[in-house]
Amino acid sequence: MNDEVYITEPAYSFKMDNPVIFGSNKAFAGYEFSGDNNASKKLLALRILQDLTIAHIYDPQPAALVDLDIKRLAFAKKQCRKSEYRQSLFKCINSRRKLYRKDSSSTQISYLIATEHYSKAH
């Protein structure tokens, strides 16, 4: 998910402007992303994240799903520059913190929340 691979993207590249990217795991996994360029690296990365989310959505231990959530949100944050998506990101992170609060992997989410607060302050 390195940004350099997108240097040669055509003008009709996939735009990550759908709020479902910041939605629940079930909403994200069930959504069918499409675009004018089905070979878009961003679209392919989202589809890989969807496949992995589907594979881990019902795991008894949520550590892999939390890791996928963090990767998806970090990827979406890089790609979505609009301020309303930043608000969606923060809401999504907070909902994940509540969802996984009893699991040890919730510390990763707490760290993500702390870095978001830090980036807003600076």
Image (tube, grey):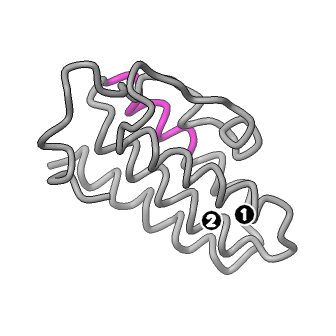
State yes or no: discs 1 and 2 in contact (Cβ < 8 Å).
Answer: yes
Circle 1: is it few (<14), some (14-19), or many (20+) Cα within 10 Å?
A: some
Looking at the image, which residue is at 42% across and 23% down?
Answer: 17
Residue under the image location 54 percent in, 36 percent down: 21
Query: Disc 1 to disc 2, how far (Cα)?
Result: 8 Å
Going 63% across and 36% down the picture, which residue do you hit? 23
The one of 52 and 11 positioned closer to us in this rendering: 11
> Residue 16 bears which disc, if any?
none
Q: Which residues are magenta?
A: 83-92
Q: Could you say which disc has been placed on residue 100 in the image?
A: 1
- Is 120 placed left or right of 75 in the picture? left
Q: Reply yes or no: does residue 85 show up in magenta.
A: yes
- Whether residue 117 appears in magenta in the rendering, the answer is no
Left-right relation of 74 to 122: right
Name the residue tied to disc 2: 66
Query: Residue 99, relative to residue 29: is it above or below?
Result: below
Q: Position of residue 90 (x, y in %)?
A: 47, 41
**Type of amino acid under label 2:** Val
Residue 27 place in picture, x, y as percent: 72, 35
Quadrant holding the N terminus: bottom left
26 versus 48 height, above or below: above
Q: Label 1's element? A: loop
Q: How many marks?
A: 2
